[in-house]
Amino acid sequence: MSARMNTSRVAHHAAAISAEPVLAEPVSAQPDIAEPSSPHTRERRDRRASPVRRWIAGAGAAALIGTGLVVLPVAGPSTPAFAEDACKPGVIGRIAGPPSALLQLEASPAVPGRTGAGVTIAVVDSGIDATRPQLSDALVGGISLINDGERPDGYGDPNGHGTAIAGLIAARPAPGSGVIGLAPEAKLLSVRVYRATDDQAEKDGFGPDAGRLAAGIRWAAQHGAQIISVSLSDDVDTPDLRSAVTEASAAGALVVASAGNRATTQNVTDSPRFPAAYPEALAVTAVDAVGAPNDSSIHGDHIEVAAPGQDVLTTATGAGDCRYSVDAPSTSFATGYAAAAAALVAQAYPQETPREWAYRLMATADRPNADKPDSLRGWGMIRPFDAIALHPDTDTRGPASPFVETSRPAAQKPTAQLAVHASETPLKTALSSAAVGGSIVLAVLAIAGLGWVLVRRRRETPAR
């Protein structure tokens, strides 16, 4: 397989959002990130909470006030502050949050100790726009592996794809903005490996390339990345890319990679995609806004976990907030969220290996069959807090565990084992505490009432 053909396949998975006012239409590839939806489309998609749901949310919030816990606000419709041009360069639009993906993941970056602090995530992509205020404080270094006139430190992104991925991973909170990353205190490395995915970019040597992708992964691992996010894929297994992932794992970095999209590849069959399919990488597919798999993603036995990839609220190059992939999920965004989730796990367990971080995410993922993966979602939708709460042992159901020495197969017969959603999120913990507290209060009142009745009867009984 020639390098040119290999380059083309990698390019067709990368998303293309240009920050320049005038765009050249791609000849062959469809953009991986859809244009933001119109206000009318958003209105049809919005859902108002039912009275019962609002009452439950209020009761939970009241209980949390007493316990001192912090929770993410109850989700409402994401409403744009501006019209459709809010994502265009020069228009600093603000969109209300929180991001719907955080609710799908049952994860909140507001929880102390669950922010990715101290963890370095490399975004191997089209670069990161360092002028975005919500990302500038997160950036700690980078490199551009293409000589196209942009900054050599990787802090430029004419395409926009890398900036969008960086925002959903580690965007800092900002007044008036609903954009916030799943790991909002993580550090970012911008590893720029391509400029665009159109034919002109490939002709100029600025399109995605398997060799340059391998070099980017190596650079990230050598410069302290613990998590390496790769929202690109290729249907060709190249020795250089394979060895780069192996070397990164040996250096203590987990490569989290996209399992592929049909709209951005010439090979639309369900087949392995690389680097996702390498044993040391974590292969991520996308699910839609209700957590269901979608035909827009490549499926197959190489998939290990799923994450939200539709209607993503994040940062835009040269602009403010933006919503992408409104109509169909993208594995690029799912990969970013999985990488951020891996960072939360790495923060909680810095002494563990990349394989153990990946195992935690797979073993605790939400799936129909706790003992078996499927070709649509792998081991299921990731649950970051459950992954952190997991105490692996020989009875943990799911994939083969790197924590215990055992010859048993991955699938186990049902026993008193870990159940999906076994861990408590802050809201669940608060509601449980409130329930227990309420039971105690009722018991005290009952005892007090019984005592009062006995005393009254004793007073009313005539002396003999």
Image: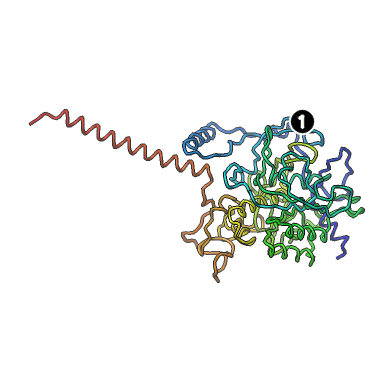
Q: From the image, tell me which residue sits under label 1.
A: 83
Q: Is residue 353 above or below residue 153?
A: below
Of all residues, the one furthest to the bottom in this rendering is 407
Q: Can you say which quadrant of the picture contains the C terminus?
A: top left
In the rendered image, residue 379, in percent from the top left (x then y), is placed at 61, 57
Kindly identify the residue that appears in the image at 64 percent across and 38 percent down.
98
In the rendered image, residue 66, in percent from the top left (x then y), is placed at 46, 36
**Image quadrant of residue 437?**
top left
> Is 253 placed left or right of 394 in the picture?
right
In the rendered image, residue 162, in percent from the top left (x then y), is placed at 77, 47
> Is 10 placed left or right of 335 in the picture?
right
Kindly identify the residue that appears in the image at 76 percent across and 40 percent down.
132
Kindly identify the residue that appears in the image at 80 percent across and 58 percent down.
213
In the rendered image, residue 177, in percent from the top left (x then y), is placed at 69, 35
Instruction: Name the foreground residue: 407 vs 318.
Output: 318
Q: What residue type is labelled 1?
A: Ala
> Is 132 placed left or right of 411 in the picture?
right
Instruction: Name the foreground residue: 188 vs 161.
Output: 188
Colour mapping used in the image: rainbow
Q: Can you say which quadrant of the picture contains the N terminus?
A: bottom right
Instruction: Name the foreground residue: 190 vs 198.
Output: 190
Kindly identify the residue that appears in the image at 26 percent across and 35 percent down.
450
Of all residues, the one furthest to the left in this rendering is 464
> Is 254 placed left or right of 448 in the picture?
right
The secondary structure type at the circle numbered 1 is: loop
Mark 1 burial class by Cα count in 10 Å: few <14, some 14-19, many 20+: few
